[in-house]
Amino acid sequence: MAHRGFSLAGLENSLAAFRAAVELGYSHLETDVHTTSDGQLLLFHDRTLDRVTDGHGNIHELTADEVRRARIGGREPVPTFDELVAAFPDARLNLDVKDWHSVPSVVAAIERHQVHDRVLIASFSDRRRRAVLKQLSRRTASSAGTRANALFLMLGPLLSIGALAPPVRAVLRRALRDVDALQVPVRYRAVPVITPGYVRRAHELGLYVHAWTINDPAEMHRLLDLGVDGIVSDRADLLKEVLQARGQWR
């Protein structure tokens, strides 16, 4: 997955960055969503405009017109979800729902464009992620939030203990009942996350493992050798080269 599109110039989450990823051949785009004070769903990672644009202020306190005056890297406007769907009608979209204000606007946008089969809903908050899923008219793919991921990481090793395996499996299946993928870092602080056992246990439960955010080719090779199902990367160009070298680029 192309993380916030692909731009070596730092134009993250711009239509230019998503276009660059698509032109490389990517069909899966990762992005983040925030919502303006008047309900416009935007593709943007931060709560404020300050880090990556020449504008200032909290997005949820600004109108869409006010946000549109800002330029990412001083060059590109902040795009809307509607613009992304229209520009790349075949792309698969990994949407990280960043705040509660965006729950109704994400639901409305998915329903408006009927892109249920092209979207994966992600959020660090399992409650927020499930709030989106609950309001949709059809099921979309979804990845676990922080609590569900932590539960799998802690309880997963117990699946190899015979007497404990059945109740632990039941607990995990319930906790991950609406989850399709575990999108996780290779490690969290000093704790290893993606290990051979972790990948094996996820697959046994029918879950995909997506590693983020991986920009080193050697690490990409190592993770693919472990059997991860997806890699989220800022360096879509390097990831493509790795997949081509392995005969896995489609």
Image: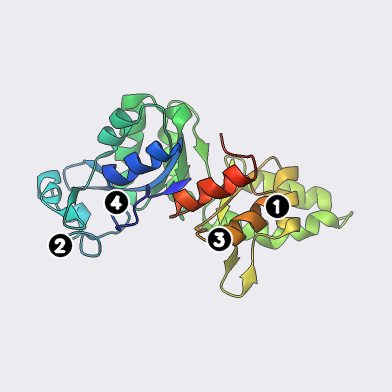
Q: Do the residues labelled 4 and 1 touch (CB within 8 Å)?
A: no
Find residue 94 and report its image quarter.
top left
Residue marked by disc 1: 225
Residue marked by disc 2: 56
Residue under the image location 70 percent in, 52 percent down: 225
> Which kind of residue does numbered mark 2 sit on?
His
Mark earlier in primary sequence (4, 2):
4
Of badges 3 and 1, the one in the foreground is: 1
- Residue sitting nearer the eye, 17 or 38: 17
Q: Position of residue 27 (x, y in %)?
A: 46, 35
Residue under the image location 56 percent in, 56 percent down: 184
Mark earlier in primary sequence (2, 1):
2
C-alpha span from label 2 to label 1? 43 Å
Mark earlier in primary sequence (2, 3):
2
Q: Which mark is residue 185?
A: 3
Crowding at dot 3, Cα within 10 Å, few <14 / some 14-19 / many 20+, comes out as some
Of badges 2 and 1, the one in the foreground is: 1
Q: Do the residues labelled 3 and 1 touch (CB within 8 Å)?
A: no
Residue under the image location 45 percent in, 54 percent down: 235
Residue marked by disc 4: 44
Q: Is mark 2 on a helix, strand or loop?
A: loop
